[in-house]
Amino acid sequence: MVPQGTTWTFRQNLTRAMWMLGGRLLFRMTFHNWYGVRRGILRLFGARVGARAKIRPTCRIEIPWNLTIGEDCLIGDESILYALGPITIGDRTVISQYAHLCAGTHDYTSRVFQLLRPPIVVGKDCWIATDAYVGPGVRVGDGSVLGARSSAYKDMESGMIYVGNPAKAVRRREVAG
């Protein structure tokens, strides 16, 4: 194997460095309830963030310009949004603490171990619970739940509850009122 060199342009590397050295640091230094300031910082770096989205200061975000977060979302403490490829999170969705959305992998069949950036799409009204993992290229259907410490490597059907590693549907989600 001869791993591929950087797949990023000079401009992309420069912008990533600016995010890592300035934006991410400023983002992390905000007070816990300064949600508007954090939304503004992310928008400054190209993220599309809905009004009233609540993103905790300890959330770790890679490449914010690949990130779309809907209205009234909650992104928990120590969650990881590894947006090498696009990550889209629908309205009213909760990404709990320590959850990990990973929109990047490598082609293990290639001698150059090429970087792949399949998008992740999380629908509206979903819950990605504590310490859950959503892998590259996964689509999470509207209203789905991925249980605590579960791992989704394949698409999740709308309105279902998934648990385990790999995640399996256990029953339909019933929402009161």
Image (tube, grey):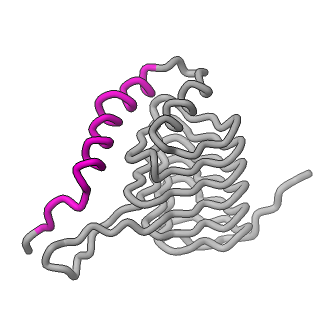
Residue 164 location (% of width, % of height): 52, 65
Q: Nearer the viewer, residue 145 or 50?
A: 50
Say whether residue 57 is magenta: no
Q: Residue at x 52, y 17 (%)?
A: 31
Residue 128 location (% of width, % of height): 59, 53
Residue 81 location (% of width, % of height): 45, 48
Say whether residue 24 is magenta: yes
Q: Nearer the viewer, residue 117 or 172?
A: 117
User: Compared to 107, does 92 lie above or below?
Assistant: above
Placement of the N terminus among the 4 image quadrants: bottom left
Q: Residue at x 57, y 63 (%)?
A: 121
Q: Residue furthest front?
A: 11
Q: Residue at x 39, y 30 (%)?
A: 23
User: Compared to 93, does 75 lie above or below?
Assistant: above
User: Compared to 68, does 160 lie above or below?
Assistant: below
User: Compared to 90, does 115 lie above or below?
Assistant: below
Residue 105 location (% of width, % of height): 32, 66
Q: Residue at x 39, y 47 (%)?
A: 63
The magenta segment: 3-29
